[in-house]
Amino acid sequence: VQLQASGGGLVQAGGSLRLSCAGSGNIVKMNHMAWYRQAPGKQRELVADIAPNGNPNYRDFLKGRFTISRDNAKDTLYLQMNSLKPEDTGVYYCAARGKPYSGTYLLSDMDYWGKGTLVTVSS
């Protein structure tokens, strides 16, 4: 079982990026999935999550700028990021929750992690 995140890069403020997280063994298809990010010097934080049925949830600070989605046929998770701000800079990680869902997406709740992809937003 693996997760491989990609799509990060350098973008100017106001720009867009689309992150992908390719899974193996139906890991994306079968599980609750989430994107996290870790800014320099800060703790890793939840950005958005999505249930197996496609229902998404977002952190309030995103204010509608990001969209999480999944393609079960491709076993791939996505994060469309628009209107990027310098404070969005960080390493973005995808993660899968293999254990039964309990209503939370704490770091300890997630069983599988991708290696992360760096997003840098310049002002």
Image (cartoon, grey):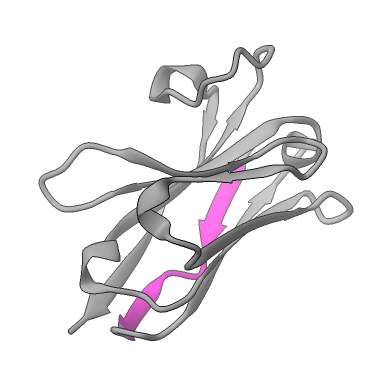
Q: Extreme right residue here?
A: 73
Q: Quadrant of the C terminus?
A: bottom left
- Residue 9 colored in magenta in the image: yes
**Residue 48 visible here:** yes
Name the residue rendered at 57%, 51% in the picture: 4
Residue 93 horizontal/vertical position (percent): 44, 47
Residue 96 horizontal/vertical position (percent): 60, 32
Is residue 104 shown left or right of residue 118?
right
Is residue 75 shown left or right of residue 19?
right
Q: How many marks?
A: 0
Q: Quadrant of the N terminus?
A: top right
User: As displayed, is residue 2 above or below residue 14?
Assistant: above
**Residue 20 visible here:** no
Per the picture, the main secondary structure of the magenta-coloured stretch is: strand
Name the residue rendered at 78%, 49% in the picture: 75
User: As displayed, is residue 99 above or below residue 92?
Assistant: above
Residue 40 horizontal/vertical position (percent): 15, 52
Is residue 16 shown left or right of residue 40?
right
Residue sitting nearer the eye, 65 or 120: 65
User: As displayed, is residue 105 above or below residue 20?
Assistant: above
Is residue 40 shown left or right of residue 18?
left
User: As displayed, is residue 33 above or below residue 19?
Assistant: above
Q: Which residues are magenta?
A: 3-11
Name the residue rendered at 32%, 80% in the picture: 10
Residue 30 horizontal/vertical position (percent): 80, 31
Residue sitting nearer the eye, 115 or 106: 106
- Residue 60 colored in magenta in the image: no
Q: Extreme left residue here?
A: 41
